[in-house]
Amino acid sequence: MDYKTKKIKNQVFQKYVQKKVSEKNLERIQNCGSFLLFHTDEGKEKKKLVHANNCENRFCPMCAYKKSRKDAMKISIMLKYLENDCQFLFLTLTSPNVTSDNLVEEIKDYNESFKRMTKLKPFMGAVIGYIRKLEIIYDGSKKITKEMYEKKKKYYDNLGLYIGDLNPNFNKYHPHFHVLLAVKKNYFSNNYIKRDTWLEMWQKAKRDYSITQVDVRKLELEKGVAEIAKYSSKDSDYLISQEVFDVMYKALKGRQIITYNGVFKESAKLYKKGDLDYLKDIDLTEYVYRILYQWGQGDYVQREIRELTDEEKERFNKQLIDEIDIEE
């Protein structure tokens, strides 16, 4: 993780959020990541963050990334626990982009629509649990870029648009659900749901037959876990301006972002109690030094380094790994 970049973004976040939180909470946000304590190996190449003064605000770039790493570990362990009894699918549900004025209502409609979808017969016959994650993307591109066109070629072709044309979704918001589904072990031979049926179910549940696609596929473990675990909106989106931040903050504040159901809900309880720790790997790195960094003058400066005592080496080495690196 690039802690310097996240701390710089945290300072932008401070400016945008200052009128929305108490003085006490603002102080915590301002001090977030002001020091970082690492343990490192003999060559000082492998570093493990063991302590920091985190603010725990879900919009803080530093804290959001740390939480996403822990969520990724939690989900990957639950998948290991369930893999002998289930198959896993990755489902993405979308609808047309909305303006800022309609974002809150659209999220509410997404939640209600998904609830209706879970009660449809094909869904109930195949799905035995899910993890659902809300994500919001802001579209700040005035014109269609090459990357945008290649990613959604069919969509733009249907509108008669090409690279360099005005982007019809400029300054709009794209809420969508990523859903990790646990299905019965015999799903692909019995109770299999075709892609067109998934689309019909989402159209019916959303009460919007203008929706033209859903994406459903067998889970690619690493990619799927990262998509579910990552934050509800990228800091590169919501920190683009005060206006966009205000919209995102209003839409997401106090809202449940990730939901566990069925076999995943039961597995989450076991994970919290530590009953699934036997599935975690042991960190085999031999940590030798303790290094303290402090933020100042736009960068982290090393303030202290010392060798761990024998008691500390015994205490901190050979511990269970509780985080997973994920791509942003």
Image (cartoon, grey):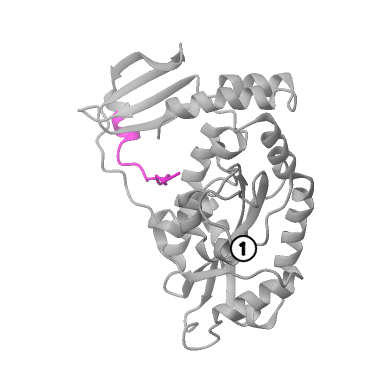
Magenta stretch encompasses residue 322: yes
Most distant residue in the bottom direction: 190
Q: Residue at x 31, y 27 (%)?
A: 311
Where does the magenta region start and end?
313-328
Q: Residue at x 48, y 74 (%)?
A: 86
List x then y, in percent, for residue 173.
Answer: 67, 48
Q: Where's the N terminus, which quadrant? A: top left
Q: Amino acid at mark 1?
A: Leu
Asked whether, in this view, residue 282 is left or right of residue 179, the answer is left
Magenta stretch prevailing secondary structure: loop
Asked whether, in this view, residue 181 is left or right of residue 14, the answer is left
Q: Where's the C terminus, which quadrant? A: top left
The residue where tag 1 is placed is 159
Q: Is residue 251 above or below residue 88?
A: above
List x then y, in percent, for residue 220.
Answer: 41, 64
Q: Is residue 124 above or below residue 287?
A: below
Write down the quadrant of residue 323 in the picture. Answer: top left
Q: Is residue 208 above or below residue 310?
A: below
Q: Residue at x 45, y 51 (%)?
A: 73
* Residue 77 in sight here: no
Asked whether, in this view, residue 240 is left or right of residue 292, the answer is right
* Residue 201 in sight here: yes
Most distant residue in the left direction: 43
The number of callouts visible is 1
List x then y, in percent, for residue 139.
Answer: 61, 46
Q: Is residue 43 above or below residue 92?
A: above
List x then y, in percent, for residue 231.
Answer: 56, 45
Write down the quadrant of residue 285 in the picture. Answer: top left
Q: Residue at x 58, y 43 (%)?
A: 141
Return the residue nearer the eye: 260 or 64. Answer: 64
Magenta stretch encompasses residue 316: yes
